[in-house]
Structure formats: C-alpha cells, structure tokens
Image: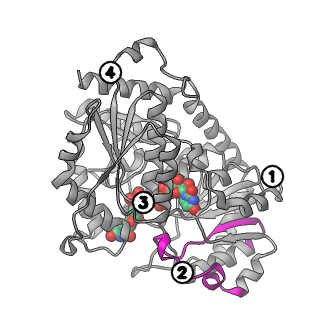
Amino acid sequence: QCQNMADSGELLLRPETHVGLFPSAGMGHLIPFLRLAALLVRHHCRVTLITTHPTVSLAESNLVSRFLSAFPQVSQVSFDLLPLDPSTVNSTDPFWIRFETIRRSAVHSLFPLLSSLSSPPLSVLVYDVSIASGAGFVSAFGDVLEIPGISPVPRSSIPPLLLVPDSLFAHIFFTDSAMLNKVDGILINTFKELEPGALEALNNRKQSEQGFPPVFAVGPFERFEFEDVDQCHAVSKWLDEQPEESVVYVSFGSRTAQSRDQLRELGEGLVKCGYRFLWVVKDKIVDKDEEEGVEMVVGEELMDKMKDKGLVVKHWVDQEKILSHKAVGGFVSHSGPNSMIEAVIHGVRILAWPQNGDQRICADVVEESGAGMWARSWGWGGDGDHYEVVKRDEIAEKVRELMESQSLKVKIKRLQEAAKKAAQVGGVRSRVFMELIEMWKMKNL
Ligand code: UDP
Ligand code: UDP
C-alpha cells in the first residue's frame, strides 16, 4: 500500500516534509489524527506525534502505544502541561479541562518544543481547533446562525453550552473562530458527496474574503490495522451468528454518558423494536471511572429481557469492525463526526440522536446526504434544566423506521460508493493529499 501513491522520483529527490501532529484530548480527536498520520506516512512525509501525559482516558494511551509500534518511523515527543488552573476551568468534563490546559500550556511552551524538532526542521504543525468535526461545523465558525450557501443553523442546533457566554466551551469556540484567518489551511475529514454545500461555502469564502485559508477535504479516513483490539471476540462471535443486515448497532461514541433513566428507556425501546441489537452502554464520560458492571447499570430485569435478541456490552469495542460486519444494517448514533463517516464508509444507515456538541450539525449532514435519518424532536442528552428522557415507544418506532426504510438503504449505498471512490488509490483523496503536501513544500522553500 505504501507504494500506491505519489511515488514519483521527483518527489523523492526533494527534502522530506516534516509534519507535526498535535491532537487534543479524547478518542474522537486522537483517532482521526492517527489515521491522518498513517496517510501522511503513506505519502512519504516524516511525522512527529506530540502527546500529553497521562492521557485522559485509557483508550487513548492504548491506542497511542499500538500506533507507535505499528509505525516505528514516526517519532513521538511529550508536551509538558502546566498544572491545572482552577480559575480558568468552569467545566466538570475531564476532556474539556484537558483541552483548556493544553491551550494554556501551548502559549507557554509549544513554540520552543516545535523549534527543537529537527532532521529536517518541522514544515508544518497540524492541530485541532476546538471541534474535530466536519465541514458543516467549520463553516459555522464566526457567523453561527446564517451561513451563506448552506441551510441556516437553527438556534436549537447550537450546542447549549455555546449559548452560555462564560462556559469553557463557548470561550474556546469563539477564541478559535477568531484565529481561523491566521492559519495556512484547514483540514477536514470529509469528502464532497457528504457535505457538498458546506465545502462549497467554505471555498466561496476563501474566494471572497481575504486571508480566509484554503480548505482541504482530506477524508474519508478509514480504520488502520493498528486500531485492532482483541477484546471483541464475544462481539464478533455473536455478530457471526446473526442474519445479514438484521442487527441495529447502538453506540454514543467515546465520551458521552447517558443518564440511568435514559439508558433503561433505551433498553426497553430496543426490546420493543423487535430487531436484533448490539448495544454499547456508557455510564461515565471517562473509561477509567467506569466501575459498575452492565447488569448494575441497566438492571437485571431488563438484561434478562434483552437476552433473546440483543448483545449488551459496556467496554470499548472495535466500532469499524462492527460497522463492517455484514450482520449490521443500522446504527443508532450520537452522530459524532467520526462515527458518521465510519458508518458511511461501511454503508450502514444512521439514526442520529445527537447528545451535545456539534452532533446536531452532523445529524443535519446525515439527513441531507442520505446517510440516514435524524430524530429531530428528541432533546439534547445530559441532565440540564430542559432534559427530557426519550420514551421507549418513540425509540422503538424510530428504530423500526430506520431498519425498514428501503429508500435509506439505497441512499446510503450510493454514498458508500462515493466514499470508496474518494478513498481509493488515485482517487480524489490522494490528489488532495498531494496538493496539500505540495503547498507545504512551497511554503518552506
Ligand atoms: N469508538 C470505538 N469504540 C467505542 C467507542 C468509540 O471504536 O467503543 C470510536 C469510533 O469508531 C470513533 C470514535 O471512537 O472513531 C468516536 O468519535 P466520534 O466523533 O464518533 O464521537 P466522540 O466520541 O468524539 O463523541
Ligand atoms: N462539553 C461538556 N462540558 C464542557 C464543554 C463541553 O460537556 O464544559 C461537551 C459539549 O457539549 C460537547 C462535547 O463536550 O458536546 C465536546 O464536543 P465536541 O464535538 O467538540 O467533542 P468531540 O466529538 O470533538 O470530542
């Protein structure tokens, strides 16, 4: 595979492009960065991965180790964090607290660290702005409500915390928006057929607004072998026993915990829907804090009811392996950006149930692109003032709609084809990578 692309003699004669990658906290950020790293290595770049220690979740440190063993040619440097400053943090979410600490520490010591990297010196630094998300959300930076070229984002789709002026989330978001004109380019894990409107809007903005950086749709990112985890045997075995496209996979990503009430209602809804299901339960935001077993969290009575048709687990799963399994037909998802792209790559239609952050923006993409449907009337997750548990009957009904819709089946397969085509050897993604690397070389001449 390494020889597939860009292997022209011309490229090899030039000095290597040295790319520094600095992901912030959480698997939703780390996974796309490591996939980007793998793609850059494939395109003959030298890569240095900058990480912070200890990582917030165990899943992150495990993945970094697996990545570094698989890619010995990638160097790793540790970035030292300043001690936590409680006066700057008004969040209880450990990932957001880490985010803020990284940002504060970067002001202090990122530049010396970057200058110390040599052989050859760093050509470019890729880091993530507060949201590792698709073109839709990036285009929402700055003018949140009215975005020329794409459907306006209703106030209800704006993450609730963004509307709280002194929240950490709002602070990070608005500081980063103001910085967008200062970067040399924006990389987004997406591709044209998934977000045509948003990508066009971003390109138009580059044409019309001086200083607005070029946008590179470097996706879709697929899973690499280093992501293999062993703990999935029970899951694979169970999936192997289910008929084709009969299973609905239910997961809310790597950092979204649901209330006990909602979890139980969801379980009841899955029993009611009549379809087979594979459900990944998450009870805590950070994996290290998970203490109780799945029976405790969901309740034994419900566990018993679910046995017939479902498999319920409460640990990290190999999501892409699940999505690529022929038994899986539908995906009830929080529509995190990575999950959305992964479902598209594997042709699994989505029922989007956004919980927070940019997930309603992604849900809109899901609906518009034909990747699935969005249960629009369901509220945000969490436990805020307006929080309402979605009831079992509604859940059952929507899941049935997802599994039974012939038109969604057709649409997702069409989108899947487009994704495959973009990512194939010589496809648009490799052209975008070559263009990007060319730009980096020019900047460093
Ligand atoms: N993921 C996984 N196994 C899990 C939970 C999550 O492999 O048990 C992966 C998933 O495939 C995706 C990432 O973690 O690549 C989650 O990113 P996403 O943007 O979907 O949501 P986030 O977790 O950031 O909210
Ligand atoms: N968030 C939170 N507490 C905060 C700030 C943010 O719970 O103080 C939530 C926020 O609502 C958002 C999520 O954390 O939904 C992070 O969103 P994002 O989409 O950036 O996460 P990612 O999927 O990129 O990791």
Q: Of residues 382 and 146, which is closer to you in this image?
A: 382
Q: Marks 3/2: CA distance?
A: 20 Å
Position above or below: 58 against 146: below
Disc with the residue nearer the chain's start (4 vs 2): 4
Structural crowding at the residue carrying mark 4, measured as other residues with C-alpha within 10 Å and reported as few (<14), some (14–19) or many (≥20): few
Disc with the residue nearer the chain's start (3 vs 2): 3
The disc at residue 26 is 3
The disc at residue 291 is 2
Q: Of residues 19 and 264, which is closer to you in this image?
A: 19
| Nearest to viewer (mark 3 / mark 4) | 4
Q: Amino acid at mark 2?
A: Glu
Q: Is 229 positioned to the left or the right of 274 in the image?
A: left
**Residue at point 45%, 42% (across, down):** 189
Quadrant containing the C terminus in the rendered view? top left
State the residue position of label 4: 15
**Residue at point 74%, 75% (across, down):** 272
Q: Is 229 positioned to the left or the right of 328 in the image?
A: left
